[in-house]
Amino acid sequence: MIEKIQQLLAEVEQLTAQNAEELEMLRIKYLSKKGAINELMADFRNVPAENKKEVGMKLNELKNRAQEKITALKEAFESQDTGGCDLDLTRTAYPVDLGTRHPLSIVKNEIIDIFSRLGFSIAEGPEVEDDLHVFTSLNFAADHPVRDMQDTFFIESNDTDVTKNVILRTHTSSVQVRAMENSQPPIRIICPGRVYRNEAISYRAHCFFHQIEGLYIDKNVSFADLKQVLLLFAKEMFGAETKIRLRPSYFPFTEPSAEMDISCNICGGKGCPFCKHTGWVEILGCGMVDPNVLEASGIDSKVYSGYAFGMGVERIANLKYQVKDLRLFSENDTRFLKEFEAAN
Ligand code: PHE
């Protein structure tokens, strides 16, 4: 009998179980009414009286060990389930690092805020676009060299019909096209979003950046309206003393087109290395929407006119915060991002 007990004891010490069912099988095998230990208990009465004490002690030891072992295995499962085994509720709190808003988000929100006060609502669209919305509907002729103005990333190219090319959008004007297709004037939207251009990455260029473009279409919209809105924006963004100047330019989708400079907000227009000693810095492109563009999206150009403008968020952020290297905006270096804590 002693031998049998020893053998069971050795077995019990080795017990392992992979899951709750296996554990239950073990419990039945050793500890249930008909289990191995109870069977030995039943045999106990046949043990000669002089051995009863020793055998009884051993039997009890076996039973206790088996119970302990099975409880321990059960606890191991339970703590695994809750993952709570190393949760120390008495530990003192440690200082938690708070995140900060990204400088581009701060500037973007500020721009959106200014234009929302002027009645513009936000429109968004896909980053993977077709040629039709990025170029063709915006008056970029299929074989015209003006397409090279924006170095495009192609995802799928279609030899017979360029309008079917699938590309990464090079500007958020594509969102404006979608808005014109889907609604009739008055349309007054701004389109914030990420755009992509195939440029070598350096301190002053990146293969992606962020834009906010605006579009206003209604009856009798004039260049004077455009100029007034942009002046107000410049003063809100860079301070009441900011001046603007418009220089003639060219975009396929606007006529007339202009580029807008603001008086350098770093030297106040006196001339400094930032504005290359001119006193002015360029911040956006704009113009009156070309009638061809309105017609391409189903808007009657004899009834309606409109203006559009577009700016790079990085450019505005640079002017506001004088970030010398554009790459910092996308490297997620927390030392750089922390500097904008106060602006949050
Ligand atoms: N889409 C132009 C660009 O990305 C900017 C622009 C928008 C110019 C609207 C004029 C009018 O360069």
Image (cartoon, grey):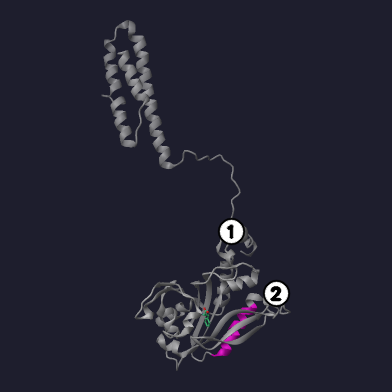
Report the mark closest to the observer, 1 or 2. Answer: 2
Residue 310: numbered disc: none
Q: Which quadrant of the structure image shows residue 79?
A: top left
Q: Which quadrant of the structure image shows residue 4?
A: top left
Answer with left or right where residue 159 lies relative to residue 111.
Answer: left
Find the magenta span and give its range. Answer: 222-235
Answer with left or right where residue 99 lies relative to residue 153.
Answer: right
Residue matched to label 1: 333
Q: Amino acid at mark 2?
A: Pro
Most foreground residue, 4 or 27: 4
- The residue shown at (64%, 73%) is 319
| Quadrant that contains the C terminus | bottom right
Separation (CA) of disc 1 from disc 2: 27 Å
Helix, strand or loop under label 2: helix
Residue 46, horizontal then vertical, whole percent = 26, 10
Residue 215, horizontal then vertical, whole percent = 50, 82
Q: Is residue 178 visible?
A: no
| Quadrant that contains the N terminus | top left
Q: Is residue 44 visible?
A: yes
Residue 71, horizontal then vertical, whole percent = 39, 30
Answer with left or right where residue 121 lies relative to residue 33.
Answer: right
Q: Which quadrant of the structure image shows residue 115?
A: bottom right
Mark toward the start of the polypeptide (1 vs 2): 2
Residue 76, horizontal then vertical, whole percent = 41, 35
Residue 273: numbered disc: 2
Q: Is mark 2 within 8 Å of ligand 1?
A: no
Does the magenta portion include 45? no
